[in-house]
Image (cartoon, rainbow, N blue to C red):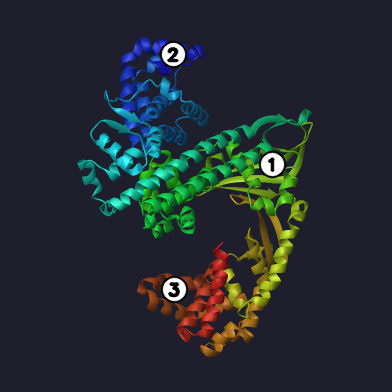
Amino acid sequence: MGMWRRRGKAASARLSAALYSVYHGLYSEAVVSSVASAVALAEVGRFREAVEYVQRAAKALYEAAREVFERVKVTVQRLVELFVEAVARALAWVDEHKAYLFLMTAVTAGAITLAAALNLWGLVELEKLAYTASLTPFVAAGVKEYSREEAFNILKKDSDPYEKFKEIAKAANDGKVKLAEPWESLRKLILPKKSEKGRLMKGRVYSELNEEKKRALFYAAFVLEEAFSVYRSALGEYAKGLREAVRREEVGEGPFKKVVYVADLGQIKQLAKKEEEAFENALSTLREKLNEYSVEHGLGGLLDVNEDVARRLAEAKQLELSRFSGVSFGVKAYAALVAYREYALGRRSPYGVAAWHWLEVGGSAWLLYYEPITAYNKAKKAKVVRPAAVEELVAEALRRLFLKPGADHLHGFVEELTKGGRLALELEEKKTKEKTGSYVFKLYNVKEGGGLKELDIRLRIRKLGESIVYALEFDDMERWLGFFKQELEAAMKAAEEVRERLPVEDRFPYMVGWVDSDVAIIRRRNERVLQMSTSHLWQLAETHALFDWSNIVVRGVSLTLEGPKPEFYARTSLGKLDDAIKKSAECGWLNMLGTKAGLKDLMYVKSWDDLKRWVADHWDIVVNAAVRRLGEGVRGELEALRDRLNDDKIAREVVAPALLLIQAERLGVNETTLRYFGAVVSGAIDGDGT
């Protein structure tokens, strides 16, 4: 009953005595059976089910002894917390990473608070949890247990780590040794027992795992384990430092006192530098070791790292993951470390979800063994997410102010914003929606005497899909515009060069491509305008060369893993597009289509609205051409679009491909049509291909 005691809390002591004397048998049976079942679920990565099982068990115990619990004022919630603690303690004996994941899942499910989970996790990190655990797993006498770290150190010291691992794996199969993850999973894959091999052979991947691939899988997991353990330790120190760098304090003077989050920017900057150095060291270790084992054992094709492919895998969207089937173990290991870091820092790609899940539970072997899409799907089923306290979110947002290259490009802005070394952030509760992970803060400089100076800036933090997006928004754009004049001047100068170098003289094909992607047509007051937002100077320059923006402002700054990036908003009248259409119809692309494709009425369109009507009137050409290429299945959907072409939101995505399809149908493929095709597509790709 030691888990019931809380030192220094008289109420908890009374509770322990009462329950121990009255319901000892009932409690013990419920705890032991529930913890055993929950641990079994958690050990195979089914964390959500483990938490749900614990919640049900706690509620069942409460109902069975309601009278006693009510008498000593113990709630169902308190019982749930105690059951969660029991499972975490038991798991910590087996694998502390799984204990951590179980706790985070319990937070996500609302079983315990984040503060309680972090407190328990702190005990794990201090190696107190395992020593004070009241429930220990059964280990047969004479069986040697190898922890995650101990097994790694033994293998690292051996001249041939792979052969040494097979020797240990054989001992494990004989019941003489018990292995922690990831070594237990590697044993199953490299030297499985007969029953295990039968199950593995049901999958296509294992049938292709010959001895050479087993050796490569081992070394990839071995190297990833070393790099990950070093970086994860540094990340833990970094997270602890960030929590200390942002604190809730009462600031201001007299009636103007308020509770805010106060950030020590100097400490955050130093932490950012240390984290980046730790990651680069881990990545360097990974590269060097993979190359070393690749050369030493002739595993080039299996361990070689194509860094470009690895980074694309780390950033891939869910539907793109299947494209990376067949990449080397080296690529997957490199991508895993990159994706894990970005997941931990807020940019949560699908492969980041997979990397965080598998590496935290000691599943690096499975992460490398599975194809990326399979690793992601299995991780997603576990439904484990990493929650974050408000202080952590604020600290991460401010850390990104100091990341390069953005911090170098916006040096003046960062220096002005961080002047004095301390920022105060006031949570605007009316604009904050904690349930959806959206927070808005008003920013102040903290003066020497403790007073606050408004900065006319807000920090917005919001969850977008798997990721967390951080951005600064300017209340007073004029006040801050001067810090971005250099970037704006560079964009204007680049626009002049772009304008002179366009391969096709007619601007309209490029413009309609951009309208199909990033340049929107919106209604502002009583007129329609063209508008675009971007954080990329090259996009601003290219579109300015085409649309000649009449108004460009900086509304805020995105805080990314590449540092701060200005958010440019550009706008001009729809008349700019009308003029380009009119000129194209007189002597450009539209004129060519009109004369050579037998569509002479196209030569008389003079505006965007005219062009929309023309496309609608000739929609049969588009539908028939598409049906010939794609089959009758698309006819109904395409015909339904005809009546919606007056809607600018629909038309801007339809007009460009419709014109290209008509061109292909009437004129085929030649040098001229390819030039216009290239112009349209380049605009569309440059817009979406950020």
List the residue tagged with mark 3.
639
What's the mark number on residue 11? none
The answer for how far apart the CA atoms under marks 2 and 1 are is: 45 Å
In front of the other: label 3 or label 2?
2
Quadrant assignment for the N terminus: top left
Residue type at the position of mark 2: Leu
N-terminal of the pair, mark 2 or mark 1, is 2
Quarter of the image for residue 647 reads bottom right
The residue at the point 61 percent across, 85 percent down is 604
Q: Is residue 549 visible?
A: no
**Secondary structure at numbered mark 2:** helix
Circle 3 Cα neighbour tier, 10 Å, few/some/many (<14 / 14–19 / ≥20) = some
The residue at the point 46 percent across, 25 percent down is 127
Quadrant assignment for the C terminus: bottom right
**Secondary structure at numbered mark 3:** helix
List the residue tagged with mark 1.
442
Circle 2 Cα neighbour tier, 10 Å, few/some/many (<14 / 14–19 / ≥20) = some
**Label 3 close to label 2 by CB (< 8 Å):** no
Q: Position of residue 173 (x, y in %)?
A: 24, 36
Residue type at the position of mark 3: Glu
**Secondary structure at numbered mark 1:** strand
List the residue tagged with mark 2.
15
